[in-house]
Amino acid sequence: MTDSHTAEQIVATSFDVERIRQDFPILHQTTHNHPLVYLDNAASSQKPNQVITAIENYYRQYHSNVHRGVHSLSEKATHEYELARKKIKNFVNAQSTDEIIFVRGATEAINLVAQSYGRDQLQPGDEIIISEMEHHSNIVPWQMLCEQTGAILKVIPINDAGELDLSVYKELLNEKTKIVGIIHISNALGTINPVKEIIKLAHDYDAIVLVDGAQAAPHEIIDVQALDADFYTLSGHKLFGPTGIGILYGKQQLLDNMPPYQGGGEMIRRVSFTKTEYNVLPHKFEAGTPHISGAIGLGIAIDYVEKIGMDNINRYEHSLMEYATKQAEQFPDLTIIGTAKNKSSILSFLLGDIHAHDIGTILDQYGIAVRTGHHCAMPVMEHFQVPATARASFAFYNTFDEIDTLFAGLNKVKEVFQ
């Protein structure tokens, strides 16, 4: 570390990042003969050995289908699968494991709510409110639902700092509002939204609220009861777990009254050609053979971050973000996109008139992995009137030295174009 790290070191000294990095095998490699600097965590995080080993052990030692066998392998797989559900229940502070539905990720969770709850509840003229900063996965399912039901989509605008205009939100709310879909932390800007206030205002009009927590779960303590969220989603691959697994949390009363999203095995009690009786929660929404190894791996990922402590992770990542922001503010020709007062560990930026894809391509030659593009948030790009941004996003295994490497790489980018 350089002397310029001094202020942030106060927070970082008690956080043994080098010890943590030893758990992540992918971090110890080179790209184009340079040490890998992985700063694309908002797209997907890396996996610790504990998660990788747990998945390998499942396939090597006790692979079997769950809930359907009386033999030892099936009983072991079922136990570990349902143990993961308990871990997730505690991680988000749900009241019951019945409120935790395994899905493929936040995208499927949102589609499940739109099609199961929304199609059953909405009438022509009803209104759905989302925001201008949503990920496409929290836009398109609601547009599809509006086409199916005749409901109307309303949008909360953002300001030039990348913050929601809550005064407009309050004006949009009315007795026709039935659903509010809001992102907890913007994947394109890093803005942390005041979701508790947003939920309370919606509940004053008896609207239900779905929170897209895919970007929040790796960085923040999630308490669905304190938020009073009706639905909350997260994706395992952003939370240091496997791809293809995520959860939908829903209040039990809502889930009980929702029809199944898909038909097949496991979600039934009894099937005949005259009538099918559906299973109880949570199995009613988990048709077919589930992603067993994914659920087990996600449970182990939660064990991992909880052992470190989400408070510790949050403080350390905040110190990384502060340090990166200071460097960015002093870097010639760099413009930060998203300057909200309350931000998570995402730095989206432009560098002069250099296209974001060129920035990413040149940085990759120095082993630095950042994301470039619209980040599945095209309306955000339209708001800032840019085609794309470069995005560096941080996790608790990143270091201050890696941030220095990023800005050294940006100097190389400028040299190329000069």
Image (cartoon, rainbow, N blue to C red):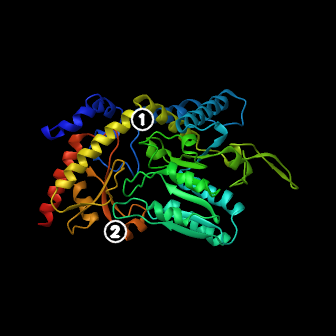
Residues 381 and 278: in front is 381
As helix, strand or loop, the secondary structure at mark 1 comes to helix
For the C terminus, give its image quadrant.
bottom left
Name the side, left or right, on which 317 lies relative to 86.
Answer: left
- The answer to which image quadrant residue 175 occupies is bottom right
Question: Which residue is label 1 attached to?
Answer: 310
Graded by Cα atoms within 10 Å as few (under 14), some (14 to 19) or many (20 or more), the crowding at tag 1 reads: some
Viewer can see residue 36? no
Viewer can see residue 292? yes
As helix, strand or loop, the secondary structure at mark 2 comes to helix
Residues 83 and 206: in front is 206
Residues 359 and 184: in front is 184
Name the side, left or right, on which 3 lies relative to 351.
Answer: left
| Residue at x-position 41% and y-position 39% | 47
Q: Is residue 390 above or below residue 20?
A: below
Question: Which residue is label 2 attached to?
Answer: 384
Q: Earlier in the sequence, mark 1 or mark 2?
A: 1
Q: Position of residue 312 (x, y in %)?
A: 37, 33
Name the amino acid, label 2. Phe
Q: Position of residue 70 (x, y in %)?
A: 73, 30
Using the numbered discs, state the Cα–Cα distance from disc 1 to disc 2 in whole angstroms.
32 Å
Q: Position of residue 6 (x, y in %)?
A: 18, 36
For the N terminus, give its image quadrant.
top left
| Residue at x-position 60% and y-position 68% | 144
| Residue at x-position 32% and y-position 42% | 318
